[in-house]
Image (cartoon, rainbow, N blue to C red):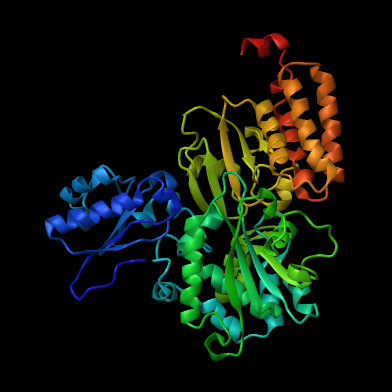
Protein backbone atom coordinates (compact mmCIF):
# COMPACT_ATOMS: atom_id res chain seq x y z
CA UNK A 1 0.00 0.00 0.00
CA UNK A 2 1.03 3.63 -0.35
CA UNK A 3 2.60 5.52 2.50
CA UNK A 4 0.29 7.76 4.56
CA UNK A 5 -0.18 11.41 3.64
CA UNK A 6 1.59 13.96 5.83
CA UNK A 7 0.61 17.49 6.76
CA UNK A 8 3.43 19.05 4.69
CA UNK A 9 3.49 19.12 0.89
CA UNK A 10 5.32 16.09 -0.43
CA UNK A 11 6.65 14.92 -3.72
CA UNK A 12 4.64 11.88 -4.83
CA UNK A 13 6.50 9.07 -6.55
CA UNK A 14 4.87 6.01 -8.12
CA UNK A 15 6.81 2.73 -8.16
CA UNK A 16 4.92 -0.38 -9.37
CA UNK A 17 4.31 -3.38 -7.13
CA UNK A 18 3.30 -5.51 -10.13
CA UNK A 19 5.08 -8.87 -10.34
CA UNK A 20 6.75 -7.94 -13.64
CA UNK A 21 8.26 -4.86 -12.03
CA UNK A 22 9.26 -6.78 -8.90
CA UNK A 23 11.09 -9.31 -11.06
CA UNK A 24 13.44 -6.60 -12.34
CA UNK A 25 14.09 -4.94 -8.98
CA UNK A 26 11.15 -2.59 -8.24
CA UNK A 27 11.42 -3.13 -4.49
CA UNK A 28 15.12 -2.25 -4.56
CA UNK A 29 14.39 0.81 -6.69
CA UNK A 30 11.69 2.00 -4.27
CA UNK A 31 13.93 1.43 -1.24
CA UNK A 32 16.81 3.30 -2.88
CA UNK A 33 14.55 6.26 -3.76
CA UNK A 34 13.41 6.42 -0.15
CA UNK A 35 16.95 6.20 1.20
CA UNK A 36 18.29 8.81 -1.26
CA UNK A 37 15.48 11.22 -0.37
CA UNK A 38 16.19 10.76 3.32
CA UNK A 39 19.90 11.41 2.76
CA UNK A 40 19.11 14.62 0.88
CA UNK A 41 16.44 15.73 3.37
CA UNK A 42 13.67 15.63 0.79
CA UNK A 43 10.20 14.62 2.04
CA UNK A 44 8.34 12.39 -0.38
CA UNK A 45 5.52 9.89 -0.59
CA UNK A 46 5.93 6.63 -2.49
CA UNK A 47 2.81 4.99 -3.92
CA UNK A 48 3.18 1.34 -4.91
CA UNK A 49 0.84 1.28 -7.89
CA UNK A 50 0.14 -1.41 -10.47
CA UNK A 51 1.88 -1.55 -13.83
CA UNK A 52 0.87 0.65 -16.78
CA UNK A 53 1.64 -2.38 -18.95
CA UNK A 54 4.72 -1.03 -20.74
CA UNK A 55 6.79 -3.92 -19.48
CA UNK A 56 9.97 -3.10 -21.40
CA UNK A 57 10.17 0.11 -19.30
CA UNK A 58 9.85 -1.60 -15.93
CA UNK A 59 10.68 -0.47 -13.37
CA UNK A 60 8.68 2.56 -14.59
CA UNK A 61 8.99 5.31 -11.98
CA UNK A 62 6.52 8.18 -12.25
CA UNK A 63 6.70 11.60 -10.57
CA UNK A 64 3.66 13.77 -9.92
CA UNK A 65 4.14 17.26 -11.36
CA UNK A 66 1.74 20.18 -11.98
CA UNK A 67 1.61 19.14 -15.66
CA UNK A 68 0.88 15.49 -14.85
CA UNK A 69 2.85 12.36 -14.14
CA UNK A 70 6.30 12.22 -15.75
CA UNK A 71 7.76 8.78 -16.51
CA UNK A 72 11.30 7.47 -16.09
CA UNK A 73 12.33 3.96 -17.00
CA UNK A 74 13.60 1.38 -16.86
CA UNK A 75 14.94 2.55 -13.50
CA UNK A 76 17.36 0.35 -11.57
CA UNK A 77 18.57 1.07 -8.05
CA UNK A 78 21.91 2.34 -9.40
CA UNK A 79 20.09 4.97 -11.50
CA UNK A 80 18.38 6.66 -8.57
CA UNK A 81 21.12 9.06 -7.44
CA UNK A 82 21.52 10.34 -11.01
CA UNK A 83 17.77 10.96 -11.24
CA UNK A 84 17.87 13.07 -8.10
CA UNK A 85 20.83 15.00 -9.49
CA UNK A 86 18.86 15.66 -12.68
CA UNK A 87 15.92 17.05 -10.73
CA UNK A 88 13.51 14.28 -11.61
CA UNK A 89 11.22 15.24 -8.71
CA UNK A 90 10.33 18.31 -10.77
CA UNK A 91 10.20 16.34 -14.03
CA UNK A 92 13.79 17.14 -14.99
CA UNK A 93 15.44 15.82 -18.13
CA UNK A 94 17.40 12.56 -17.96
CA UNK A 95 18.40 9.75 -20.31
CA UNK A 96 15.63 7.62 -18.77
CA UNK A 97 12.95 10.33 -19.09
CA UNK A 98 9.93 9.72 -21.34
CA UNK A 99 7.94 12.87 -20.67
CA UNK A 100 4.32 12.75 -19.57
CA UNK A 101 3.24 9.13 -19.19
CA UNK A 102 -0.10 9.76 -20.86
CA UNK A 103 1.69 10.98 -24.00
CA UNK A 104 4.01 8.02 -24.49
CA UNK A 105 2.82 6.79 -27.93
CA UNK A 106 2.46 3.15 -26.82
CA UNK A 107 0.09 4.26 -24.07
CA UNK A 108 -1.60 7.24 -25.75
CA UNK A 109 -2.88 5.18 -28.71
CA UNK A 110 -4.78 2.71 -26.54
CA UNK A 111 -8.48 2.65 -25.58
CA UNK A 112 -8.39 1.79 -21.92
CA UNK A 113 -11.69 0.76 -20.42
CA UNK A 114 -11.00 -2.35 -18.34
CA UNK A 115 -7.46 -1.20 -17.54
CA UNK A 116 -8.37 2.48 -17.03
CA UNK A 117 -7.09 2.52 -13.43
CA UNK A 118 -4.16 0.09 -13.74
CA UNK A 119 -0.91 1.84 -12.96
CA UNK A 120 -2.74 4.97 -11.82
CA UNK A 121 -4.13 4.13 -8.38
CA UNK A 122 -2.89 2.49 -5.23
CA UNK A 123 -4.44 -0.97 -5.77
CA UNK A 124 -5.35 -1.35 -2.09
CA UNK A 125 -6.86 2.08 -1.49
CA UNK A 126 -10.66 2.06 -1.52
CA UNK A 127 -10.50 5.86 -1.54
CA UNK A 128 -8.35 5.87 -4.70
CA UNK A 129 -10.72 3.40 -6.35
CA UNK A 130 -13.75 5.58 -5.57
CA UNK A 131 -12.01 8.76 -6.75
CA UNK A 132 -11.35 7.12 -10.13
CA UNK A 133 -14.90 5.94 -10.78
CA UNK A 134 -14.90 2.75 -8.75
CA UNK A 135 -18.18 1.23 -7.47
CA UNK A 136 -20.31 3.50 -9.67
CA UNK A 137 -21.38 0.49 -11.73
CA UNK A 138 -22.28 -1.45 -8.59
CA UNK A 139 -24.21 1.51 -7.16
CA UNK A 140 -26.29 1.60 -10.33
CA UNK A 141 -26.78 -2.18 -10.24
CA UNK A 142 -28.08 -1.98 -6.67
CA UNK A 143 -30.94 0.18 -7.95
CA UNK A 144 -31.82 -2.18 -10.83
CA UNK A 145 -33.69 -5.46 -11.02
CA UNK A 146 -31.65 -8.60 -11.81
CA UNK A 147 -33.29 -8.88 -15.23
CA UNK A 148 -32.39 -5.25 -16.03
CA UNK A 149 -28.73 -5.91 -15.19
CA UNK A 150 -28.64 -9.02 -17.37
CA UNK A 151 -30.26 -7.08 -20.22
CA UNK A 152 -27.65 -4.32 -19.92
CA UNK A 153 -24.81 -6.83 -20.11
CA UNK A 154 -26.47 -8.67 -23.00
CA UNK A 155 -27.02 -5.48 -25.00
CA UNK A 156 -23.38 -4.42 -24.48
CA UNK A 157 -22.28 -7.34 -26.65
CA UNK A 158 -19.80 -8.55 -24.01
CA UNK A 159 -18.47 -12.01 -24.82
CA UNK A 160 -16.33 -14.26 -22.65
CA UNK A 161 -12.71 -13.13 -22.61
CA UNK A 162 -11.40 -16.54 -21.60
CA UNK A 163 -11.13 -17.84 -25.14
CA UNK A 164 -14.46 -19.24 -26.32
CA UNK A 165 -16.13 -15.85 -26.80
CA UNK A 166 -19.54 -17.04 -25.53
CA UNK A 167 -22.01 -14.16 -24.97
CA UNK A 168 -21.88 -13.26 -21.28
CA UNK A 169 -25.47 -12.11 -21.08
CA UNK A 170 -26.81 -15.45 -22.32
CA UNK A 171 -24.85 -17.31 -19.65
CA UNK A 172 -26.06 -14.94 -16.93
CA UNK A 173 -29.66 -15.20 -18.10
CA UNK A 174 -29.50 -18.99 -17.90
CA UNK A 175 -28.34 -18.83 -14.27
CA UNK A 176 -30.88 -16.10 -13.44
CA UNK A 177 -33.76 -18.29 -14.65
CA UNK A 178 -32.47 -21.47 -12.98
CA UNK A 179 -34.36 -22.51 -9.85
CA UNK A 180 -32.09 -23.36 -6.92
CA UNK A 181 -31.59 -22.65 -3.23
CA UNK A 182 -27.98 -21.66 -3.87
CA UNK A 183 -26.11 -20.08 -6.80
CA UNK A 184 -22.44 -19.24 -7.26
CA UNK A 185 -20.18 -16.82 -9.12
CA UNK A 186 -16.80 -18.32 -9.98
CA UNK A 187 -13.97 -16.35 -11.52
CA UNK A 188 -11.46 -18.47 -13.42
CA UNK A 189 -8.16 -16.63 -12.87
CA UNK A 190 -6.01 -19.64 -13.71
CA UNK A 191 -4.52 -17.85 -16.77
CA UNK A 192 -2.35 -20.72 -17.95
CA UNK A 193 -1.81 -19.61 -21.56
CA UNK A 194 1.81 -18.95 -22.41
CA UNK A 195 2.43 -15.27 -23.11
CA UNK A 196 -0.62 -14.03 -21.17
CA UNK A 197 -0.57 -11.86 -18.07
CA UNK A 198 -3.59 -9.54 -18.26
CA UNK A 199 -5.52 -11.31 -15.49
CA UNK A 200 -2.54 -11.11 -13.17
CA UNK A 201 -1.93 -7.45 -13.97
CA UNK A 202 -5.47 -6.36 -13.19
CA UNK A 203 -5.69 -8.44 -10.00
CA UNK A 204 -2.46 -6.88 -8.79
CA UNK A 205 -3.19 -3.38 -10.11
CA UNK A 206 -6.97 -2.91 -9.73
CA UNK A 207 -8.39 -5.72 -7.57
CA UNK A 208 -11.55 -3.87 -6.52
CA UNK A 209 -12.65 -3.85 -10.17
CA UNK A 210 -12.87 -7.65 -10.10
CA UNK A 211 -14.69 -7.59 -6.76
CA UNK A 212 -17.15 -5.04 -8.16
CA UNK A 213 -17.74 -7.07 -11.32
CA UNK A 214 -18.37 -10.28 -9.40
CA UNK A 215 -20.74 -8.54 -7.01
CA UNK A 216 -22.74 -7.10 -9.91
CA UNK A 217 -22.90 -10.60 -11.42
CA UNK A 218 -24.14 -11.99 -8.09
CA UNK A 219 -26.93 -9.43 -7.86
CA UNK A 220 -27.86 -10.10 -11.49
CA UNK A 221 -28.35 -13.86 -11.12
CA UNK A 222 -29.24 -14.21 -7.44
CA UNK A 223 -25.95 -15.70 -6.25
CA UNK A 224 -24.77 -15.21 -2.68
CA UNK A 225 -21.34 -16.85 -2.74
CA UNK A 226 -18.35 -16.49 -5.03
CA UNK A 227 -14.82 -17.77 -5.50
CA UNK A 228 -11.78 -16.49 -7.35
CA UNK A 229 -9.66 -19.41 -8.54
CA UNK A 230 -6.03 -18.23 -8.90
CA UNK A 231 -3.04 -20.35 -9.87
CA UNK A 232 -0.34 -20.77 -7.21
CA UNK A 233 2.27 -19.23 -9.54
CA UNK A 234 0.59 -15.86 -8.88
CA UNK A 235 1.45 -15.27 -5.19
CA UNK A 236 1.31 -11.47 -5.48
CA UNK A 237 -2.12 -11.59 -7.10
CA UNK A 238 -3.35 -13.98 -4.40
CA UNK A 239 -2.12 -11.71 -1.60
CA UNK A 240 -3.50 -8.55 -3.24
CA UNK A 241 -6.93 -10.07 -3.90
CA UNK A 242 -7.22 -11.40 -0.35
CA UNK A 243 -6.36 -8.02 1.13
CA UNK A 244 -8.72 -6.22 -1.25
CA UNK A 245 -11.55 -8.59 -0.28
CA UNK A 246 -10.88 -7.87 3.40
CA UNK A 247 -11.03 -4.12 2.74
CA UNK A 248 -14.23 -4.53 0.70
CA UNK A 249 -15.86 -6.30 3.66
CA UNK A 250 -14.74 -3.45 5.95
CA UNK A 251 -16.33 -0.91 3.59
CA UNK A 252 -19.57 -2.95 3.30
CA UNK A 253 -19.14 -3.64 -0.43
CA UNK A 254 -19.23 -7.35 0.46
CA UNK A 255 -21.11 -9.20 3.17
CA UNK A 256 -24.68 -9.72 4.37
CA UNK A 257 -25.87 -6.14 3.88
CA UNK A 258 -24.17 -4.48 0.89
CA UNK A 259 -24.53 -0.81 1.75
CA UNK A 260 -27.83 -1.40 3.49
CA UNK A 261 -29.61 -2.74 0.42
CA UNK A 262 -30.37 -6.23 1.65
CA UNK A 263 -28.19 -7.80 -1.03
CA UNK A 264 -25.82 -10.49 0.24
CA UNK A 265 -22.60 -11.68 -1.38
CA UNK A 266 -19.60 -13.41 0.17
CA UNK A 267 -16.34 -13.80 -1.73
CA UNK A 268 -13.18 -15.81 -1.17
CA UNK A 269 -9.96 -16.80 -2.96
CA UNK A 270 -8.98 -20.39 -3.75
CA UNK A 271 -5.50 -21.29 -4.99
CA UNK A 272 -4.98 -23.93 -7.69
CA UNK A 273 -1.89 -26.06 -8.14
CA UNK A 274 -1.06 -24.73 -11.61
CA UNK A 275 -2.70 -27.33 -13.83
CA UNK A 276 -3.36 -25.89 -17.28
CA UNK A 277 -6.49 -28.00 -17.64
CA UNK A 278 -8.10 -26.03 -14.80
CA UNK A 279 -8.45 -23.14 -17.21
CA UNK A 280 -11.34 -25.24 -18.56
CA UNK A 281 -14.41 -24.35 -16.52
CA UNK A 282 -15.54 -27.81 -15.43
CA UNK A 283 -12.01 -28.82 -14.41
CA UNK A 284 -11.79 -25.67 -12.32
CA UNK A 285 -15.10 -26.54 -10.64
CA UNK A 286 -13.81 -30.04 -9.84
CA UNK A 287 -10.71 -28.49 -8.28
CA UNK A 288 -12.81 -26.01 -6.28
CA UNK A 289 -14.74 -28.96 -4.89
CA UNK A 290 -11.48 -30.48 -3.66
CA UNK A 291 -11.20 -33.08 -6.37
CA UNK A 292 -8.60 -33.75 -9.04
CA UNK A 293 -8.91 -31.26 -11.89
CA UNK A 294 -10.51 -33.32 -14.66
CA UNK A 295 -13.10 -32.25 -17.20
CA UNK A 296 -16.77 -33.05 -16.86
CA UNK A 297 -18.95 -34.15 -19.74
CA UNK A 298 -21.39 -31.49 -20.91
CA UNK A 299 -24.35 -31.36 -20.62
CA UNK A 300 -25.23 -30.57 -17.93
CA UNK A 301 -23.85 -27.06 -18.32
CA UNK A 302 -22.29 -25.34 -15.29
CA UNK A 303 -24.93 -22.63 -15.64
CA UNK A 304 -27.45 -25.27 -14.54
CA UNK A 305 -25.33 -27.74 -12.56
CA UNK A 306 -22.00 -26.18 -11.70
CA UNK A 307 -20.21 -25.85 -8.36
CA UNK A 308 -21.57 -28.50 -5.96
CA UNK A 309 -24.27 -29.19 -8.53
CA UNK A 310 -25.76 -25.69 -8.26
CA UNK A 311 -26.29 -23.06 -11.00
CA UNK A 312 -22.98 -21.26 -11.47
CA UNK A 313 -21.70 -18.33 -13.48
CA UNK A 314 -18.14 -19.07 -14.61
CA UNK A 315 -16.35 -16.12 -16.21
CA UNK A 316 -12.72 -15.13 -16.41
CA UNK A 317 -11.09 -12.00 -14.98
CA UNK A 318 -11.32 -9.82 -18.10
CA UNK A 319 -15.00 -10.67 -18.58
CA UNK A 320 -15.92 -9.75 -15.03
CA UNK A 321 -13.78 -6.61 -14.90
CA UNK A 322 -15.53 -5.37 -18.06
CA UNK A 323 -18.87 -5.40 -16.24
CA UNK A 324 -18.39 -2.32 -13.97
CA UNK A 325 -17.70 -0.04 -16.95
CA UNK A 326 -20.77 -1.41 -18.76
CA UNK A 327 -23.02 -0.69 -15.78
CA UNK A 328 -21.40 2.70 -15.20
CA UNK A 329 -21.33 4.01 -18.78
CA UNK A 330 -24.17 1.95 -20.24
CA UNK A 331 -24.43 -0.82 -22.82
CA UNK A 332 -24.47 1.59 -25.77
CA UNK A 333 -21.18 3.21 -24.75
CA UNK A 334 -19.42 -0.15 -24.47
CA UNK A 335 -20.94 -1.47 -27.70
CA UNK A 336 -19.61 1.57 -29.58
CA UNK A 337 -16.16 -0.04 -29.38
CA UNK A 338 -15.34 -2.99 -31.63
CA UNK A 339 -16.56 -4.48 -34.90
CA UNK A 340 -19.22 -6.97 -36.00
CA UNK A 341 -20.14 -9.30 -33.16
CA UNK A 342 -16.90 -8.53 -31.30
CA UNK A 343 -17.77 -5.56 -29.11
CA UNK A 344 -15.80 -3.60 -26.57
CA UNK A 345 -12.07 -3.84 -26.00
CA UNK A 346 -9.58 -6.58 -25.24
CA UNK A 347 -6.23 -6.38 -23.46
CA UNK A 348 -3.88 -7.83 -26.06
CA UNK A 349 -0.66 -9.16 -24.56
CA UNK A 350 2.54 -8.91 -26.60
CA UNK A 351 5.19 -11.45 -25.61
CA UNK A 352 7.98 -13.58 -27.02
CA UNK A 353 10.50 -12.03 -29.40
CA UNK A 354 9.03 -8.52 -29.29
CA UNK A 355 10.80 -5.22 -28.68
CA UNK A 356 8.04 -3.55 -26.68
CA UNK A 357 6.23 -6.29 -24.80
CA UNK A 358 3.25 -5.54 -22.62
CA UNK A 359 -0.48 -4.84 -22.49
CA UNK A 360 -2.29 -3.07 -25.33
CA UNK A 361 -5.98 -2.48 -24.68
CA UNK A 362 -7.68 -1.74 -27.99
CA UNK A 363 -11.14 -2.12 -29.46
CA UNK A 364 -11.73 -5.27 -31.49
CA UNK A 365 -10.83 -4.68 -35.12
CA UNK A 366 -7.21 -3.68 -34.57
CA UNK A 367 -4.93 -5.72 -36.85
CA UNK A 368 -2.06 -7.97 -35.94
CA UNK A 369 0.22 -5.70 -37.98
CA UNK A 370 -0.73 -2.67 -35.88
CA UNK A 371 -0.14 -4.56 -32.65
CA UNK A 372 3.17 -6.05 -33.75
CA UNK A 373 4.74 -2.98 -35.32
CA UNK A 374 2.97 0.20 -34.16
CA UNK A 375 2.91 -0.97 -30.56
CA UNK A 376 5.39 -3.86 -30.36
CA UNK A 377 8.09 -2.25 -32.50
CA UNK A 378 8.99 -5.52 -34.24
CA UNK A 379 11.31 -8.14 -32.80
CA UNK A 380 13.83 -7.46 -30.07
CA UNK A 381 16.46 -9.25 -32.19
CA UNK A 382 15.85 -6.93 -35.12
CA UNK A 383 15.16 -9.90 -37.41
CA UNK A 384 11.93 -10.19 -39.43
CA UNK A 385 8.84 -11.62 -37.76
CA UNK A 386 8.16 -15.02 -39.30
CA UNK A 387 5.21 -16.17 -37.21
CA UNK A 388 3.01 -15.32 -34.27
CA UNK A 389 0.96 -17.66 -32.13
CA UNK A 390 -2.33 -16.02 -31.23
CA UNK A 391 -4.66 -17.29 -28.55
CA UNK A 392 -2.32 -19.28 -26.30
CA UNK A 393 -0.42 -22.56 -26.67
CA UNK A 394 -3.37 -24.14 -28.49
CA UNK A 395 -3.75 -21.22 -30.89
CA UNK A 396 -2.77 -21.12 -34.55
CA UNK A 397 0.63 -20.07 -35.87
CA UNK A 398 0.02 -17.24 -38.32
CA UNK A 399 2.38 -16.01 -41.06
CA UNK A 400 2.96 -12.36 -42.15
CA UNK A 401 0.45 -12.81 -45.00
CA UNK A 402 -2.29 -12.84 -42.33
CA UNK A 403 -1.01 -9.91 -40.24
CA UNK A 404 -3.67 -7.61 -41.74
CA UNK A 405 -6.31 -9.84 -40.14
CA UNK A 406 -8.49 -7.80 -37.74
CA UNK A 407 -8.72 -8.99 -34.18
CA UNK A 408 -12.29 -10.23 -34.37
CA UNK A 409 -13.69 -13.59 -33.23
CA UNK A 410 -15.35 -14.39 -36.54
CA UNK A 411 -12.48 -13.16 -38.74
CA UNK A 412 -10.03 -15.36 -36.86
CA UNK A 413 -12.37 -18.36 -36.91
CA UNK A 414 -12.62 -18.01 -40.70
CA UNK A 415 -8.89 -18.80 -41.02
CA UNK A 416 -9.01 -21.57 -38.37
CA UNK A 417 -7.45 -19.37 -35.70
CA UNK A 418 -8.73 -17.85 -32.47
CA UNK A 419 -8.44 -14.61 -30.53
CA UNK A 420 -8.48 -16.51 -27.24
CA UNK A 421 -7.40 -14.60 -24.16
CA UNK A 422 -5.61 -12.00 -26.28
CA UNK A 423 -2.10 -13.44 -26.02
CA UNK A 424 0.30 -12.97 -28.95
CA UNK A 425 3.68 -14.73 -28.90
CA UNK A 426 6.16 -13.54 -31.54
CA UNK A 427 8.85 -15.53 -33.37
CA UNK A 428 11.53 -14.21 -35.72
CA UNK A 429 12.84 -15.93 -38.86
CA UNK A 430 15.16 -18.21 -36.92
CA UNK A 431 12.23 -20.28 -35.60
CA UNK A 432 11.76 -23.92 -36.62
CA UNK A 433 8.02 -24.33 -37.03
CA UNK A 434 8.15 -28.12 -37.05
CA UNK A 435 9.65 -28.00 -33.56
CA UNK A 436 7.00 -25.48 -32.52
CA UNK A 437 4.31 -27.87 -33.75
CA UNK A 438 5.96 -30.61 -31.72
CA UNK A 439 5.79 -28.34 -28.67
CA UNK A 440 2.00 -28.20 -28.96
CA UNK A 441 1.77 -32.00 -28.79
CA UNK A 442 4.30 -32.17 -25.96
CA UNK A 443 2.39 -29.50 -24.04
CA UNK A 444 -0.85 -31.44 -24.38
CA UNK A 445 0.83 -34.67 -23.27
CA UNK A 446 2.10 -32.93 -20.13
CA UNK A 447 -1.08 -31.02 -19.29
CA UNK A 448 -3.85 -33.45 -20.30
CA UNK A 449 -6.11 -34.41 -17.41
CA UNK A 450 -6.05 -37.96 -18.80
CA UNK A 451 -9.80 -38.50 -18.74
CA UNK A 452 -10.27 -39.22 -22.45
CA UNK A 453 -8.17 -41.42 -24.73
CA UNK A 454 -7.87 -39.14 -27.80
CA UNK A 455 -6.17 -36.45 -25.72
CA UNK A 456 -4.25 -38.63 -23.25
CA UNK A 457 -2.83 -41.07 -25.80
CA UNK A 458 -3.13 -38.95 -28.94
CA UNK A 459 -0.74 -36.28 -27.65
CA UNK A 460 1.91 -38.89 -26.77
CA UNK A 461 1.62 -40.50 -30.19
CA UNK A 462 1.72 -37.01 -31.71
CA UNK A 463 5.11 -36.29 -30.12
CA UNK A 464 6.45 -39.58 -31.46
CA UNK A 465 5.23 -38.86 -35.00
CA UNK A 466 6.64 -35.32 -34.86
CA UNK A 467 10.01 -36.67 -33.76
CA UNK A 468 10.10 -38.94 -36.80
CA UNK A 469 9.18 -36.06 -39.13
CA UNK A 470 11.84 -33.81 -37.63
CA UNK A 471 14.39 -36.61 -38.02
CA UNK A 472 13.49 -36.88 -41.71
CA UNK A 473 12.05 -40.42 -41.43
CA UNK A 474 9.37 -41.27 -44.06
CA UNK A 475 8.25 -37.65 -43.93
CA UNK A 476 5.28 -37.84 -46.34
CA UNK A 477 3.84 -40.94 -44.69
CA UNK A 478 4.28 -39.53 -41.21
CA UNK A 479 2.65 -36.22 -42.17
CA UNK A 480 -0.35 -38.21 -43.42
CA UNK A 481 -0.40 -40.10 -40.13
CA UNK A 482 -0.12 -36.82 -38.20
CA UNK A 483 -3.11 -35.36 -40.03
CA UNK A 484 -5.16 -38.48 -39.26
CA UNK A 485 -4.17 -38.27 -35.60
CA UNK A 486 -5.17 -34.58 -35.49
CA UNK A 487 -8.58 -35.46 -36.90
CA UNK A 488 -9.16 -38.08 -34.21
CA UNK A 489 -8.13 -35.65 -31.44
CA UNK A 490 -10.36 -32.90 -32.82
CA UNK A 491 -13.43 -35.09 -33.20
CA UNK A 492 -13.02 -37.41 -30.23
CA UNK A 493 -11.64 -35.39 -27.32
CA UNK A 494 -13.92 -34.62 -24.39
CA UNK A 495 -12.90 -30.97 -24.05
CA UNK A 496 -11.02 -28.20 -25.84
CA UNK A 497 -7.62 -29.34 -24.55
CA UNK A 498 -7.38 -32.31 -26.89
CA UNK A 499 -9.75 -30.85 -29.44
CA UNK A 500 -7.65 -27.73 -29.98
CA UNK A 501 -4.15 -29.21 -29.74
CA UNK A 502 -4.25 -29.94 -33.50
CA UNK A 503 -4.81 -26.23 -34.29
CA UNK A 504 -1.16 -25.13 -33.91
CA UNK A 505 0.03 -28.35 -35.60
CA UNK A 506 -2.24 -27.95 -38.62
CA UNK A 507 -1.50 -24.24 -38.94
CA UNK A 508 2.24 -24.90 -38.92
CA UNK A 509 1.79 -27.58 -41.60
CA UNK A 510 -0.36 -25.26 -43.69
CA UNK A 511 1.65 -22.04 -43.47
CA UNK A 512 5.19 -23.34 -43.02
CA UNK A 513 5.32 -26.68 -44.92
CA UNK A 514 9.00 -26.25 -45.79
CA UNK A 515 9.96 -26.86 -42.15
CA UNK A 516 8.40 -30.34 -42.30
CA UNK A 517 9.87 -31.58 -45.56
CA UNK A 518 13.61 -31.27 -45.07
CA UNK A 519 15.76 -34.12 -46.31
CA UNK A 520 17.52 -36.47 -43.84
CA UNK A 521 20.83 -34.97 -45.01
CA UNK A 522 19.69 -31.47 -44.07
CA UNK A 523 18.53 -32.71 -40.66
CA UNK A 524 21.84 -34.47 -40.06
CA UNK A 525 23.72 -31.29 -40.95
CA UNK A 526 22.00 -29.28 -38.21
Q: Is residue 214 above or below residue 360?
A: below
In the displayed structure image, the side of residue 48 where residue 404 appears, left or right: right
- Say whether residue 344 is visible: no
- Say which of 23 and 426 sits in front: 23
Q: Position of residue 459 (x, y in %)?
A: 77, 36
Q: Position of residue 142 (x, y in %)?
A: 59, 85
**Residue drawn where x is 56% and y is 37% of the image:** 426
**Residue drawn where x is 47% and y is 39% of the image:** 377
**Residue drawn where x is 74% and y is 34% of the image:** 505
Could you tell me which quadrant the C terminus lies in? top right
**Residue drawn where x is 76% and y is 21% of the image:** 468
- Say whether residue 166 is visible: yes
Could you tell me which quadrant the N terminus lies in? bottom left
- Say which of 37 and 142 sits in front: 37
Mark count: 0
Q: Is residue 409 above or below residue 486?
A: below
Q: Is residue 344 above or below residue 357?
A: below
Q: Position of residue 195 (x, y in %)?
A: 57, 44
Q: Position of residue 380 (x, y in %)?
A: 46, 33
The quadrant holding residue 31 is bottom left
In the displayed structure image, the side of residue 396 where residue 197 appears, left or right: left
- Say which of 192 and 395 sits in front: 192
The quadrant holding residue 318 is bottom right
Amino acid sequence: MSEPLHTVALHTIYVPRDAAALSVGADETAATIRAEATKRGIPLRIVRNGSRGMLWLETLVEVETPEGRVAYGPVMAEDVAGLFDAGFLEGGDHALAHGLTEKIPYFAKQERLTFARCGIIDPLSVEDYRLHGGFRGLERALAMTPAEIVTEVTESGLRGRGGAGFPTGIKWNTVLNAKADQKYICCNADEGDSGTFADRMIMEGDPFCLIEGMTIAAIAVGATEGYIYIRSEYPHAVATMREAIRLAYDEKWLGDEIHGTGHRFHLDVRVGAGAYICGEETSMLESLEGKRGTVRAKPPLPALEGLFGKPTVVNNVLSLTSVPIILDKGADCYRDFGVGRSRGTLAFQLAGNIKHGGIVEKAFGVTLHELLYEFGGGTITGRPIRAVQAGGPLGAYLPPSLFDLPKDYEAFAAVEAMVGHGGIVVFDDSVDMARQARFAMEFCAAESCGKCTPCRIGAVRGVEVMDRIIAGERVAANITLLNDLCEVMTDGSLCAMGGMTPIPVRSALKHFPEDFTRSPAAVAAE
